[in-house]
Amino acid sequence: MNRWKKFSMIVVSVVVFGIFIGYMVGMFFNSGSDNKQAQEKIVVAKGEEIDDLVNSEGVIIDSMHKMLHQKVIADKKIGFIVMSPENIKKLRHLLDQSDKILEKEKYVEILNRWEKGDFSQAVEEHNYMLEQAGGESTGKAKRFATPKEEKAYLKEQSKKEGSSAKIE
């Protein structure tokens, strides 16, 4: 009888161990498919980084201009910085740290709208920033991008840079 107990305990242990190993292998292979599905639902783009080490009006204008590229349709767009709460905060911090910016009030007003998710003046803001930067008239925004066009633009930027940052 003692022999049967040992045999039964070994069999039960092997079965439990096998179930555990099977579960772990299943989790390993299935976790990747969940991530792939999530990545397909989210547009991926990172864009350039805001140069927050140099506190100048030129950096602020350039950054705001590039952030607006995803919100407007123009014949020519050079550069891209993703329109994100983090980047808006970086720009606000740069503005707060400087006393020598000529159009500081206007930039603060624009950032206030962006923080609230109001991009209704994106075309005018883009063209103003382009003018302030001394950009070409071929880069002027013609109209506001539809959500579908914005998503396509972000996807295009993602492909160009091979990025893995997620933007909703």
Image (cartoon, helix red, strand yellow):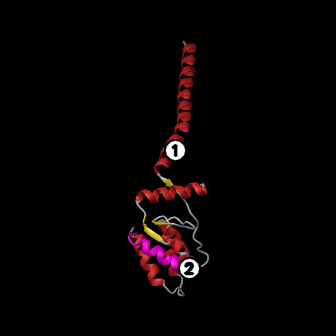
> Circle 1 sits in a helix, a strand or a loop, which is it?
helix
Q: Which secondary structure dominates the residues rendered in magenta?
A: helix
Magenta span contains residue 69: no
Q: In front: 87, or 151? A: 151
Q: Give the residue drawn at x 47%, y 78%.
A: 128
Q: Quadrant of the N terminus?
A: top right
Q: Position of residue 29 (x, y in %)?
A: 55, 37
The residue at which mark 1 appears reads as: 36
The amino acid marked with disc number 2 is Gly
Residue at x 53%, y 69% (from the top left corner) = 66
Q: Nearer the viewer, residue 41 or 152?
A: 152
Please state the horizontal and vertical placement of residue 65, each as a whole percent of the image. Answer: 51, 72
Q: Position of residue 14 (x, y in %)?
A: 57, 24
Residue 156, quarter of the rendered image: bottom right
What amino acid does circle 1 point to?
Lys
* Circle 2 residue: 134
Pick whichever, 34 or 149, lies toward us: 149
Q: Is residue 163 something one can see in this rendering?
A: no
Marker disc for residue 3 = none
Which tag, 1 or 2, sits closer to the chain's start? 1
Q: Residues within 10 Å of mark 1 (few under 14, many from 20)?
A: few
Left or right: 35 as drawn, with respect to 113: right
**Does the magenta portion include 124?**
yes
Image quarter of the C terminus: bottom left
Q: Residue furthest top?
A: 1
Tell me the quarter of the picture where residue 8 sits: top right
Q: Total marks drawn?
A: 2
Q: Can residue 29 be seen here?
A: yes
Left or right of 45, for residue 105 = left
Mark 1 and mark 2 residues within 8 Å of each other at the beta carbon:
no
In this picture, which residue range is highlighted in magenta? 118-131
